[in-house]
Image: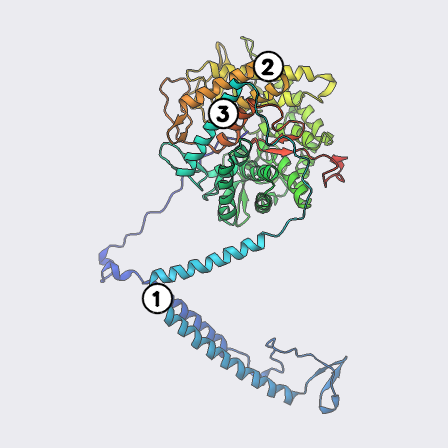
Amino acid sequence: MTTPALLPLSGRRLPPLNLGASAFPHHRATLRLSEKFILLLILSAFITLCFGAFFFLPDSSKHKRFDLGLEDVLIPHVDTSKGGKNLGGFIIHGQGHDEHRHREEEERLRNKIRADHEKALEEAKEKLKKSRDEIQAEIQTEKNKVVQELKKKDSKPLPPVPLPNLIGINSGEPADPDIREKRNKIKEMMKHAWDNYRQYGWGHNELKPIARKGHSTNIFGNSQMGATIVDALDTLYIMGLHDEFREGQEWIDKNLDFSVNSEVSVFEVNIRFIGGLLAAYYLSGQEVFKIKAVQLAGKLLPAFNTPTGIPWAMVNLKSGVGRNWGWASAGSSILAEFGTLHMEFVHLSYLTGDPVYYNKVMHIRKLLQKMDRPNGLYPNYLNPRTGRWGQHHTSVGGLGDSFYEYLLKAWLMSDKMDTEARKMYDDAIEAIEKHLIRKSNGGLTFIGEWKNGHLERKMGHLTCFAGGMFALGADGSRDDKAGHYLQLGAEIAHTCHESYDRTTLKLGPEAFKFDGGVEAVAVRQNEKYYILRPEVIETYWYMWRFTHDPKYRQWGWEATQAIDKYCRVSGGFSGVKDVYSSSPTYDDVQQSFFLAETLKYLYLLFSNDDLLPLDNWVFNTEAHPLPVLHLANTTLSGNPAYR
């Protein structure tokens, strides 16, 4: 589940110092030093420094040795009859010979420095004859050379690894013409979203479909990393939009560069970029996606350099410096962020043969297992310096959600061998059911939030993913409770459908209350928006796969029609600010997860079950499918969790 984008604090700048015209007798234009003059100053300083260094060279009369590194002072044993002193098989030459040789070397060095200075002055004169544009072009050429060298250095070939048995990547065509027509409509919506991004936001992280320009948030830093391209690749592939897929692949091959001075969210970059690249690699077999995923993973590893090994929320891709969100409780890391790395990092170790990724996420798990949990619940905040919980706030929605999802999916992805993960999931779900899950007066099952010993009777759109999670985890649950958890999933799906059905637009709000007479309805204005989120549709799809109850396709089609009617604009798709208004305003953002998740889950809902079957594929929290690593295929079977 994707956490909401968080706005950065606004920065302040000191006002410019205005000295006024009277401060200097000359016209303002004369204060600007030309670039050529600056260059000349730099060269002059360099030459002065070199000459200074030359005149301070050690005096040969005071030193027996002046080692320029040109010849070794220690010379293999020769005839000692000419004044040399034998020391253990080597000769140190006598003083007269040594001083003579030393003067020759010193003279040669002087001549070399003079020649270098003359050459530098000639080059400087030539540079100063060139125009500003020519100088800038030369600088850019040199920078490009350095970038290409770095790319070559980073593009080390990875060890060949046998691909897991991949099933169901090109099928799913429904026989029913009505279902097929609906599926084709969803494919057309995907093409509309992609084509407009291609035209107006190409290379940017996201699209502003009304302003028709690129858009980004601080989770991606200040760089254009093409988040929508990476996020959408696997959706394009399974929909058979192969021309569009190749466009994205070409952009990634030529333009996706992680050597940028940009501070990014470790969690978001992991689930969207690493998850998206790995899924594209498994589906298409194109090596470029695997190589890019491994390059990016290397850039995220410095985030784990904390006293506890719990990673920072953000890391600078260039410097490796990490930090946490300023608003997080007492400088804490967030459960849903550091707890949503396991799937991708296990696959990275599988593909590279390097256990570092696996070890990082297993270290997090071991630390969490040792900690006390209030009422068996995992608080959302953990301090990476002290290893202590922050504020005791527990949520299955934002800040907590995908941690629980990844415990279950770690077990599924290991071909159900990682029993440690399954036990942690079962323990957590039992505590959640005991303390957070309630029925409203109107009979709606909901999942509240635990805040300092008090249950807040509010449920977020993000929490609606849990219906699908309960259904996915039903098989293999304790005490033969599979039927119970499948029913719980159905009840959550029903509640979340009600949150859609009770709005004017038939689209769900960001959060909804269960207080008094208000049920499954947003109360605050800042909770009435819909930003193209996928979680409700995700649960419909899982419930359809496990029950084939036609109501889930019916509910999914209602959502499809509402999105197409109220969120579609000529330049793509936009979120809306109030789902209870008959004439809503747009937020003018086409989220990358709309292409990665919302449209993918809708397409799968109207496809046959042989497209990405759940026995063979596990979806990360951004809906990127990763194959189950059967024990015969995995390089990790030596680890205790996989025995």
Q: Quadrant of residue 92?
A: bottom right
Disc assigned to residue 130: 1
Question: What amino acid is at disc 3?
Answer: Asn
Residue 507 at what x, y percent from top left? Answer: 46, 19
Q: Is residue 185 above or below residue 549?
A: below
Q: Which of the two discs, 3 and 2, sits closer to the camera?
A: 3
- Label 2 environment density (alpha carbons within 10 Å; few <14, some 14–19, many ≥20): few
Disc assigned to residue 309: none
Disc 3 from disc 1: Cα separation? 59 Å
Disc 3 from disc 2: Cα separation? 21 Å
Residue 359 at what x, y percent from top left? Answer: 68, 41
**Quick check: marks 3 and 1 in contact, CB under 8 Å?**
no
Q: Quadrant of residue 451?
A: top right
Find disc 3 in the rendering and name its residue: 184
Find disc 2 in the rendering and name its residue: 549
Question: What amino acid is at disc 2?
Answer: Asp
Q: Is residue 491 above or below residue 311?
A: above
Going by the image, does 572 lie left or right of 467? left
**Local SS, label 2:** loop
Residue 202 at what x, y percent from top left? Answer: 43, 40
Disc 2 from disc 1: Cα separation? 75 Å
Q: Specify how the rendered protein is coloured.
A: rainbow
Q: Of residues 168 and 67, which is closer to you in this image?
A: 168
Going by the image, does 371 lie left or right of 314? right
Question: What amino acid is at disc 1?
Answer: Lys
Q: Is residue 325 visible?
A: no
| The C terminus sits in image quarter | top right
- Label 1 environment density (alpha carbons within 10 Å; few <14, some 14–19, many ≥20): few
Q: Of residues 506 and 110, which is closer to you in this image?
A: 506
Residue 376 at what x, y percent from top left? Answer: 66, 24
Please report the residue visible at 64 percent of the width from the left and 17 percent of the height from the top: 486
Q: Is residue 47 visible?
A: yes
